[in-house]
Amino acid sequence: MKSEQRVKISGTGGYLPARRVTNDDLAAELDTSHDWIVSHTGICARHIMAADESPCDMAERAARVALERAGVAAADLGYIIVATTTQDYSGFPSTACLLQGRLGATQAGALDISAACTGFVYSLEVARGLMHCDRGARPTLVVGVEAMSRIVDWKDRNTCVLFGDGAGAAVLELTSEAGRGILASYLRAEGSNPDTLYCGGGLRTQPPVTEARLAHMNGRVVFGFAVKAMAEVVLHFLETLQLSPEQVSFVVPHQANIRILQAAQKRLPIAPEKFFMNIAEVANTSAASIPLALAELDRSGRLRAGDLVITTGFGAGLTYGGNAILW
Ligand code: UT7
């Protein structure tokens, strides 16, 4: 690798399952309403994986689109990284290995990354590190995929209305082009209160595992953390990269709750219209959220080469972080 080279995103892809579940559909089964959900979260619908689909199926759909848009053959990939907490197998093999086999990426190393909703942000930085370490690095495929519908308690209105399924993918390549590529990432964790947002099951002994593999959340605590964390990430980049707010083309936040995004926006000097949002249609897809949003923004034609895009996310762990990318 030459010192002036950066890692750029050369192709994106997204996949949402065909089954679209509206708030009214949920209200038919649960003590909730369209008005409550939309006013408290900004969510109108979510997409749910079919009974015969798997997370790897969704990841493959998004990956193939990203590879095609990048003009990269799967056989040329050097790494496949999958950010997910809802794997096809519980534990192993990783979803990245399954995807490697599906795509026929015969030269690729493959690994999953577990950082919940911040998983894609973490994965981009891990990929960047690998590509900078590995002289002459091949392209890397990074996918965020999540089947949240399989781990939410559909009787718990506090959590189930928030989530959806999907996958987003990005192909990364080294570039020497001036004004393109990932400038920096910011990765943080606050792991001292894991019960704020966790998935049951697992092998821990303290406290002993008694519950099923279902998501649990203290919504208000997560809300407060999220607003602070999402704003901190963007402010970090403005300060450390010495950027003016006008230089930021888009902020692509984790689509968790529109009220979180609006509260974070108010803490930042960046114009509200620069915050990309698709939560109304996709809900919170955890690790797939940011790459799905990037793929949609990319496809919309609103992004120009060299635009500065800042991602910012948070999730279970608790984790948070972002990436500053010259598109
Ligand atoms: O990727 C990270 C994932 N997590 C998040 O982003 C979650 C962050 N937190 C949130 O988004 C919000 O805290 C929620 C949307 C989960 C909840 O909104 P809230 O304004 O904090 O509501 P609340 O928890 O204070 O609850 C207010 C009321 C309660 O009723 P009572 O106790 O006041 O009678 C809840 O039982 O709203 C009730 N409620 C609902 N009502 C209708 C909670 N969920 C629902 C619902 N439909 N789906």
Image (cartoon, rainbow, N blue to C red):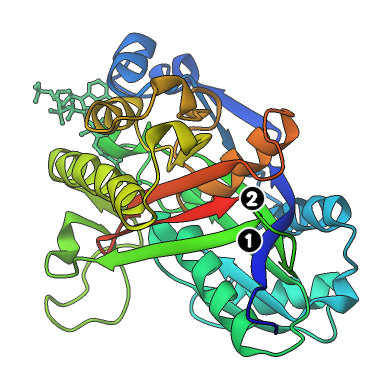
> Could you tell me which secondary element the residue under label 2 belongs to?
strand
* 5 versus 70 height, above or below: below
**Residue drawn at x 21%, y 69% as measured from the top left:** 210
| Residue 163 seen in the figure | yes
Specify the amino acid type for callout 1: Val
In the rendering, which numbered label is found on residue 143?
1
> Could you tell me which secondary element the residue under label 1 belongs to?
strand
| Residue 289 seen in the figure | no
- Residue 165, percent from left and from top: 55, 44
Q: Specify the farthest residue to the top.
A: 35
Label 1, residues with CA under 10 Å away: few <14, some 14-19, many ≥20? many
**First reached walking from the N terminus: tag 1 or tag 2:** 1
**Residue drawn at x 24%, y 28% as measured from the top left:** 263
Q: Is residue 6 left or right of residue 116?
A: right
* Residue situated in front as seen by the camera: 52 or 83: 83
Q: Is residue 71 left or right of residue 324?
A: right
Q: Which residue is mark 2?
A: 168
- Where does ligand 1 appear, by image quarter? top left
